[in-house]
Image (cartoon, rainbow, N blue to C red):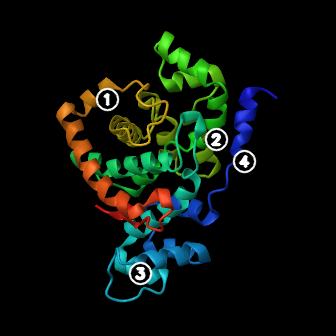
């Protein structure tokens, strides 16, 4: 079996994203979807229901009365917040583990992904765009490919790193040359397997090469910007860190300069410091609800 075949086979070894969550993510792109449609699907998963109610009844939300059902939670906290709570809970199970090939410790990938999710709101506001659940989901899961590719990168790390130095390749380009596939492309295949909406698939697949996306360019470009800014902050950057090539033309097209990046970083750091205390990732704290903060 070739190295590329082994890597593609690793997709089957990834813990499955819950079927009800897959369906819920599909629904967020359907304009015909109502909040009741979402609840109709999610209410049959007891673990999701229990976790959501636990968070909604926590001190964080400070609701005046106890919430006893998903429908009540929907009314009390809103559609977007309910969906973000659920997505954050489920994705954290996939992103908490160390990713040694990228020198990411326990929860580092999760922290980086969360930073990108927060930035999807911050940058959307700066560009006068709606901070949608599609953007939030794509930002949260953009690096899912690293979870499968990590141990292959670890085996070939020296060769990959040499290419970034000797030939000035980005880390993704070096991955592609050595392994036959990069983590973004692999992540796109995972998103396809999970039957996610096409904008999310494309954002994951092309977040290091937004100009290659033939559709949904605005979504892809924004996730790329989120990733670049999160990398600059050093949150969960890992071994690949800043060995990526930022898209200067992308920044220019959106009229973003150094001052904008500085403002993004300040806003992110302010929010991240606050929510990191709530998240308490390293000790496995229960809180994930901070993702819903605006």
CA neighbours of label 4 inside 10 A, class few (<14), some (14 to 19), many (20+): few
> Residue at image x 22%, y 33%?
256
User: Earlier along the polypeptide chain: callout 1 or callout 3?
Assistant: 3
Quick check: marks 4 and 2 in contact, CB under 8 Å? yes
Locate residue 78: give its quadrant.
bottom left
Label placed on residue 195 = none
Visible residue check, residue 151: yes
Q: Secondary structure at mark 4?
A: helix
Circle nearer the viewer, 1 or 2: 2
Q: Nearer the viewer, residue 149 or 74?
A: 149
User: Earlier along the polypeptide chain: callout 4 or callout 1?
Assistant: 4
Q: Which residue is mark 2?
A: 148
Locate residue 123: give its quadrant.
top left
Quick check: marks 3 and 4 in contact, CB under 8 Å? no
Cα distance between the residues tagged 1 and 3: 42 Å
Cα distance between the residues tagged 1 and 2: 29 Å
Instruction: Assign the C terminus to one quadrant of the image.
Output: bottom left
CA neighbours of label 2 inside 10 A, class few (<14), some (14 to 19), many (20+): many
**4 shown above or below 31:** above
Q: Nearer the viewer, residue 201 or 182?
A: 182
> Residue at image x 25%, y 52%?
270
Q: Which residue is mark 4?
A: 13
Quick check: marks 2 and 3 in contact, CB under 8 Å? no
Label placed on residue 57 = 3
Circle nearer the viewer, 4 or 1: 4
User: Earlier along the polypeptide chain: callout 3 or callout 4?
Assistant: 4
Q: Position of residue 238 (x, y in %)?
A: 48, 36
Q: Secondary structure at mark 2?
A: helix
Cα distance between the residues tagged 4 and 2: 8 Å
Q: Position of residue 16 (x, y in %)?
A: 66, 56
């Amino acid at each position: 079996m070739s190295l590329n075949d082994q890597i593609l086979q690793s997709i089957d070894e990834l813990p499955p994203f819950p079927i009800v969550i897959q369906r819920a993510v599909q629904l967020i792109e359907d304009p015909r979807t109502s909040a009741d449609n979402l609840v109709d699907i999610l209410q049959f998963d007891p673990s999701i229901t229990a976790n959501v109610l636990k968070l909604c009844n926590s001190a964080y939300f400070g609701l005046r009365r106890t919430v006893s059902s998903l429908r009540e939670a929907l009314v009390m906290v809103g559609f977007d917040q309910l969906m973000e709570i659920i997505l954050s809970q489920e994705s954290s199970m996939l992103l908490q583990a160390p990713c040694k090939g990228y020198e990411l410790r326990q929860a580092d990938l999760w922290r980086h992904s969360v930073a990108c999710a927060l930035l999807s709101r911050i940058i959307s506001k700066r560009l006068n765009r709606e901070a949608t659940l599609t953007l939030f989901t794509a930002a949260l899961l953009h690096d899912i490919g690293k979870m499968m590719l990590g141990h292959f990168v670890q085996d070939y790390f020296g060769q990959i790193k040499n290419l970034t130095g000797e030939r000035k390749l980005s880390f993704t380009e070096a991955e592609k040359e050595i392994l036959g596939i990069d983590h973004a492309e692999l992540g796109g295949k995972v998103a396809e397997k999970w039957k996610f909406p096409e904008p999310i698939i494309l954002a994951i697949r092309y977040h290091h090469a937004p100009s290659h996306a033939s559709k949904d360019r605005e979504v892809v470009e924004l996730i790329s910007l989120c990733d670049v800014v999160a990398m600059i902050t050093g949150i969960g950057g890992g071994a690949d860190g800043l060995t990526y090539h930022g898209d200067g033309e992308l920044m220019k097209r959106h009229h973003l300069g150094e001052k904008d990046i500085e403002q993004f970083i300040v806003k992110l750091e302010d929010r991240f410091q606050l929510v990191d205390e709530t998240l308490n990732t390293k000790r496995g704290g229960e809180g994930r609800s901070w993702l819903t903060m605006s």
